[in-house]
Image (cartoon, grey):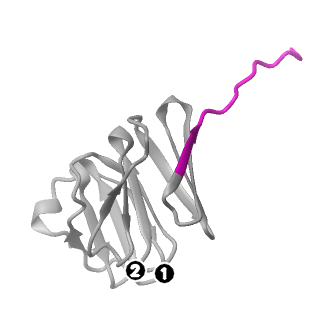
Amino acid sequence: MLPCSEKDAKFTAVFFAEQKYGWAVGSGGAIIASTGGGRLWRAQASGVDADLTDVFFTSNRDGWAVGDRGTIIRTTNGGGQWTLENSHTDHRLERVYFYKDKGWAVGFGGVILKYSDDYRTSSETKPAIRPRTDQ
């Protein structure tokens, strides 16, 4: 069951950090969370109006969401509060992933953002794409 205000949102990604703890993100900055394995969902205030495209949690407390206009938001308390992070790009970010203390976000325009250490340092790189010459 969805909260009333979130029923019109188009959800684009869902992530479960553990069997019981899950989050979904979508249009207009919509975020919903479940602590009951997806049976019931409650809205969380993202603090942004950008469409969110992906969400990833490293625990049931620490998570990230990305989306339009280079939007990156972070929570350290399970979504009780989301904080806008500076991505240094205005390209749409499509995916976010973390492994241990390193994270990556990728998006339009060939943008690849890498986060390390305290999760607040970022660098934008564009992959070198070379044409095949063996054909």
Q: Is residue 10 among what the camera can see?
A: no
Quarter of the rendering containing residue 2: bottom left
Q: Residue tagged by mark 2?
A: 21
- Is there a contact, CB below 8 Å, between mark 1 and mark 2? yes
In terms of secondary structure, where does tag 2 sit? loop
Please say if 109 is above or below 112: above
- Horizontally, residue 128 falls left or right of residue 38, namely right
Sort mark 1 into few (<14), some (14-19) or many (20+) by Cα contacts within 10 Å: few
How many angstroms separate mark 1 from mark 2 (CA)?
A: 5 Å
The magenta stretch spans which residues? 122-135
Query: Which residue is at 76% across, 18% downward?
Result: 131
Task: Name the residue nearer the viewer: 87 or 56.
Answer: 87
Is residue 126 within the magenta segment? yes
Please say if 6 is above or below 62: above
Quadrant (top left, top right, bottom left, bottom right) of the C terminus: top right
Please say if 29 is above or below 34: above
Task: Name the residue nearer the viewer: 74 or 119.
Answer: 119
Residue type highlighted by circle 1: Glu
Q: Residue tagged by mark 1?
A: 18
Quarter of the rendering containing residue 4: bottom left
